[in-house]
Image (cartoon, helix red, strand yellow):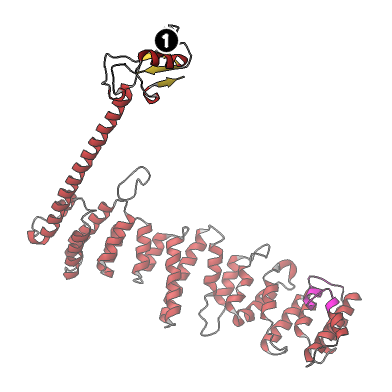
Amino acid sequence: AIDTALLVLFVGFTHKLKNKSSPPPQDEKDIMDKLPFATLADLLLPSNECALEECAEYLQKGVDEPQELDYACLYQSKKKYKVALEVWRDLYEGARIEEGEDGVQPAIELLEKLNVTSDLDPPNLLWEHASWILKAKPREGMRIFTSTERKPPLDSNEVLAFLRNFKTTKGTDVDLVGIFLEHISSNTDNQRYHDMYAHRLHSHYLSVVESKAPVMVIQNARIKLRKYLQTGSSFDMQRMLELISKSSLYDEMIVLYSRLGLHRSVLQTYVYELRDYNAAEKYCIDKGVVRRTAENEGMPTRAELLNVLLRVYLKYGEDRPADNHSRVGFHHLLAHCTEYLDPVETLKLLPDDMPLDEITPYLETVMRTSVSSKRNKQIVSKLVRAERFQTQVQLLEVKRKSFTIDTKTECAVCRKKIGDSYFSAHPPDDCLFPGRMLPGSSRKWTIVHKGCSRKYAKLRGTGRGVGDVLHVR
């Protein structure tokens, strides 16, 4: 009874406020502000204690205009889904009218959550109402089938059969089957669905081309196809390659050739079909490694791929009629990729009857590069030798300050054994520059206790600075 009273109060007041041109009286405004909900849906959903028949009649006849959305929401809250869906459909078709409302969005929000077998009576309500929803808003309506909120999900084969038989509004470029297959392929590793999605992307692209759709639609369809071919991992690439080859989609063929490791086919496509030698060279440099290591074992090197491209150019006259394009590509390769090519392997590939003037620029470049490389290596070698010499000098400097001490060594002043005490090492008295003593010199350092160090210096009268004496623990 309380919920019924609240419903009547809320609908009555909101209807009054809607039709008044002047602000409402303060007492009415205070009443509305004290209500524990902002919309009628907040009161009704997910459940309520409203009297169904009484409230339904009030929503239809209690105010000047029927409150159709609230009427459907009331039946939804009582799990009378059939009535609610029929009201929303009538709003879409115009049999019922409420300003600014077509009933599509609430119908989608309901159907994307309900369990077909337990919540809907009869179960075919979903399929019945999905038809008009998809005609009204095809892309948004697909949420009914792709929602992850429904447990358990709909049977994929049943959905596919429904979507294939559904006829979209003429002029609509939304691929409903493709949307559903994309959803399935992103949530399963089943190769069957991945193959179906890849084939669907291909057929959808061909269909929009055939129907002469807007350029943007065609471009988007092809971009989506190419992106899936680049990133998809569970579809049969070989079968897809055979299918695409019939459509002359060369960029997509290159993607699949590359993923299958058919680098020669990639380069043949660039040279024979696209006639783009710059792209062919870039492919070799991007896909090839500089040198093979344990980490990239199995990957081709840049030199290997460029040699394959060179063979493609040299056999152009055998595979295809020779023309000026192949000669331009051949000379461009020799001129711009010298640093990557192995000169010995390259010369082996060149035919014996090739005119010398055609490869003279390449040979000159190779010679210059070879001489420059040799000189650079000589410079590096000399720098390394100089560094090695400096290191040896530093080592000798350290050795010059070395001395030997053992358990029998006595202090030169007090004649007591040094043992494990602190001690000082004085350089020979006749050595003016201790740091320049020659290795192996017969002159010896004098070992004294640290406490005897100053006394020894006074006795000798050397006047050496503290920096010339080694104090060791």
Above or below: residue 392 compared with residue 92: above
Q: How many marks?
A: 1
Query: Can see residue 382?
Result: yes
Q: Quadrant of residue 444?
A: top left
Q: Position of residue 57 (x, y in %)?
A: 85, 85
Q: Quadrant of residue 69?
A: bottom right
Residue pointed to by mark 1: 411
Q: Position of residue 59 (x, y in %)?
A: 82, 85
Q: Is residue 465 magenta?
A: no
Q: Position of residue 343 (x, y in %)?
A: 17, 51
* Residue stretch in magenta: 33-49
Q: Nearer the viewer, residue 418 or 394?
A: 418
Q: Is residue 118 left or right of residue 59?
A: left
- For label 1, count other residues whose C-alpha is less than 10 Å away and answer few (under 14), some (14-19) or many (20+): many
Q: Quadrant of the N terminus?
A: bottom right
Q: Is residue 236 left or right of residue 373?
A: right
Query: Can see residue 124?
Result: no
Q: Residue at x 18, y 59 (%)?
A: 334
Above or below: residue 99 compared with residue 128: below
Element marked by disc 1? loop
Q: Nearer the viewer, residue 41 or 183?
A: 41
Q: Is residue 45 magenta?
A: yes
Q: Is residue 71 left or right of residue 170?
A: right
Q: Nearer the viewer, residue 117 or 30?
A: 30
Q: Residue at x 30, y 57 (%)?
A: 285
Q: Quadrant of residue 364?
A: bottom left
Q: Residue at x 45, y 11 (%)?
A: 418
Q: Pick out the residue farthest to the right.
A: 1
Q: Position of residue 420 (x, y in %)?
A: 48, 13
Q: What amino acid does circle 1 point to? A: Cys
